[in-house]
Image (cartoon, coloured by chain):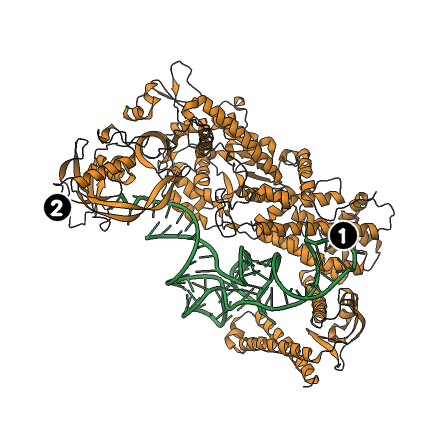
Chain colours: A orange, B green
Amino acid sequence: MKKEVPKAYNPQEVEDKIYKKWEESGFFNPDNLGLSEDAEKFSISMPPPNATGVLHLGHASMLAYQDLMTRYNRMCGKSALWLPGTDHASIATQTKVEKIIAKEGKTKYDLGREKFLERVNKYVENSKNTIKNQTRKMGSSCDWSRERYTLDDGLSRAVREVFVKMYNDKLIYRGDRIVNWCPRCESTLADDEVEHKDQKANLYYFKYDKNFPITIATTRPETKLGDTAVAVNPKDKRYKKYIGNIYEIDLGNGKHKIKIIADREVEMKFGTGALGVTPAHSMTDWEMAEKNDLEKIKIIGEDGKMNASAGKNYEGLTVLEAREKIVKYFQENNLIEKVEEVDQSLSICYRCDTPIEPLPSKQWFVAVDKKITIKGNKYFQNKSLKEVSFEVVKNKEIKIIPERFEKTYFHWMENLRDWCISRQIWFGHQVPVWYRDESGIRNYESRINSKFNNEIYIGVESPESEGWTQDKDTLDTWFSSGIWTFSTLLNQDRKKYKTFEDWIANSPDLKKFHPTSVMETGYDILFFWIARMILMTTYTLGEVPFENIYLHGMVRDKQGRKMSKSFGNGIDPIEMIEKYGADALRLSMIIGSSPGNDIKMYEEKVEGYRNFVNKLWNISRYIIVACIKDSKNEKDDLVSKNKKIVKLSNCQIVKEQKFSLPTLADKWILNKLNNLIEEVTDDLDNYRFSQAGEKIKEFTWNDFADWYIEVSKIEKNKDEILNYILKQLLVLAHPFIPFVTEEIWKNFNAENLLITEKWPSRRDADLLRLLCNKDAINGDAMNRVSTTFEIIQSIITAIRNARAEYKIEPSKKIDAVIYAGNKKELIESQLHLIKNLRTGIDKSEIKEKGEKIKDAAYLVIGDVEIYLLGMVDKEKEKKNLQKEINELEKYIKAIQAKLGNDNFVENAPREIVNKERKKYQESEEKLRKLKEKLISLGS
RNA sequence: GGGCUCGUAGCUCAGUUGGUUAGAGCGCUACCUCGACACGGUAGAGGUCAGAAGUUCGAAUCUUCUCGGGCCCACCA
């Protein structure tokens, strides 16, 4: 039964089929790997892609890395789990759906909470499926049986449990504090959800009224309606005399007092050096107000409009309208001194770019500085969340790759303030808090103004008695993402467990796979997510969420710009997969990129790796064909034939002694392969993915295809070695390019899937050792083999080069005379290669040394001299010789300078000096020969 | 304002702890059908490693500064 192997690899035809085979095999689930209980564990939580829309290149790169690690570790015999999932991404998803219904002319209020959430869930269901299918397209070997979603019952339950636990430990509190408010989202934001945008702004210099002694400067005149103080620097001589004074002003919203206070934070050089303090609408001012016991007047409401406290003239106006109006008022009353244009950094919402209003509000917070002690938790012994999160990275319990991001992490952690976790978003985990007095929570305004009452219930389940209403707020999406590594591993059947502690302690997966081995993600969510996971997990479990953090870069276009749909420079990964195959796309993400550095993507790159994948395909095609041809067995049953061949223990070559093996080329390639196995393993163990991939590619293309396979066509009967090398290569390359390797593997070995093939090690994969069973093989001997073969390679290259230079027709044969010196034996033994590897040598004569030959091209390779007879072009030859001599002389001069330097000879390691000496001698010798030849040519 | 990062062939990038005449891919030039591969083969051209100073026997690699990109953080109102 002959097999037809297509000429070019066609990923479209095989990828889906292979993925299906993998899924059916069950090997994505570590429970099916047939490993013993004590097998080493490897686990990755897939950073949940937002449940909004489709897969982009950022996801593709994340999937490529994670799959690479998972497959590698699975092949290493570990119990490898890659747990997939999706995140509900509250604000992002809600905003998206709001935009969709806006197109229908509706708002969420038109639909009402319940209907709106139905709509959101439908949307999420849809995009989740899209994302899942696209994840499969990438070849991701994640365990779909353990797939999770942040709003699953089990995960939601865990969220509530953690909330209550933190509340009981007094790490969650309800506070009335200034928060970042997005008027568009109508919700609070965490500090790091606020972005900054540089812009020009008017800085107004003015006085509150004519009698006020100090001119102040502001970019937000409308907030002055809420001022209760003016702050100056205590060192400022201009204002010292006013400190402590209290003035009464009226901007049209009733009289209020302005106290002159001193604060070191005030910059004397900015504006007038005097700052109008608006406690309710600025973080800094709020702190000053706390210190100085100032009144806080809230004049801007949650809708972004001025409220009653702003006065009749302003109530109901938007912030910008109010600004215009009050500036007009100042102008009319001649209070403005000047207006200056300044650069300002405007705070905007990271989801919708709306300017943020800082305002006071009653919200739920996580206390990051509160020191606590938790029984049985090795971290929390009179420590705060912040301290513990800091320490686990400091003492390397968690390693960040690349290391430099530790600095960023520390800096961020040090400056972390209490984390506001309640959001006025509808979509998400509702805060597990119930109130008796429903009116107290119905709208924000009244809630903020009402006194905090004791009619409150906090628990994992709703209170049993009647009359309670749950808080309408939901939790920050990062609160649930923060527990992702372990909430996903909890046994989803909570009923089996009595307490939360019991649930944590006795969930089998959690016990087995946590802490996860590595967290692989983009550096852009180091703070959002990574920091939160560390914080929440050390607290809840008393262990770190992961042992390593591998941060990949952002994917950019060829010009280094961020990819975005609106800009039109985005590359759709699915389109690339359809065109070039998932393997090619994966390689183009991995090779040429280093951790923490951005990666530039463009189509030609993917095309290049598609070519490589195809090259590998054709290598296998050749080997299959060669096997059929060389096989004495008339029954060309590839499968059974190859089953025998790839099994090392059955190595027929050694047993039957069919031909004199190994040849120099065999030893060379097998030694290279052994080195490759060693280096790639080391690279992968140390997260050097790019280098590992590059090495595999180089070996495959340059050494194996371009040299060894060509040699095999001459030396013949190498099907077993070829098979062996290919087999090892497929294993090494599989984590990088799973589809094509599995497909080729299928052609060679129908019984097992490559996905669970054992990762090779130098020792147990060593065909070279088997072949050379009598000779002791050590590193030195093998390296000598390498250099020896490289001499033959140089000779062949030099001859080809000469032919091209002299424009000898490819079909024309030439004769050669070789003076080989002490390499006579070597040259004789490898003459079949020198003659046949596209050098076109016909007759040859090999001597140790001899007379110069006229009318022949002359080559010197090391100490071997070669004359190519019949190649005459005196002028050309002279020119070439002269050029070579010039270069060589320059080179020799450089070495001479080195060796002439006593300091070098004395201080440099002996090896280096000897190496230089040897180079010097060889070069001198070569120079002498070249010069003689040049002279012999005459003028 | 603080911090990080990059600047190596026309383009995109490698270059582990300082030690080969600095590498690869794409592109470019010439030639090629040789038992798999034109998504291929062979050969070649192309770089004072941004600039300056320093450390060292020796620097693309370490230090400092300058110039030029990029990113992150920060309550200059």
Number of numbered markers:
2
The vertical placement of A643 against A923, above or below, is above
- Could you tell me which quadrant the C terminus of chain A lies in? bottom right
Residue A265, disc: none
Nearer to me, A856 or A552: A856
Q: Which of marks 2 and 1 is nearer the N terminus?
A: 2
List the residue tagged with mark 2.
A241
Tag 2 secondary structure: helix
Nearer to me, A459 or A744: A744
* Residue at x 76%, y 73% (from the top left corner): A824
List the residue tagged with mark 1.
A622
Q: What amino acid is found at the position of numbered circle 2 in the picture?
A: Lys
The vertical placement of B5 against A783, above or below, is above
Q: Tell me if mark 1 has few (under 14), some (14-19) or many (20+) residues whose alpha carbon lies within 10 angstroms of its own.
A: some
Calculate the distance from the C-alpha at mark 2 to the C-alpha at mark 1: 93 Å
Q: Can residue A743 be seen in this view?
A: yes
The vertical placement of A777 against A809, above or below, is above
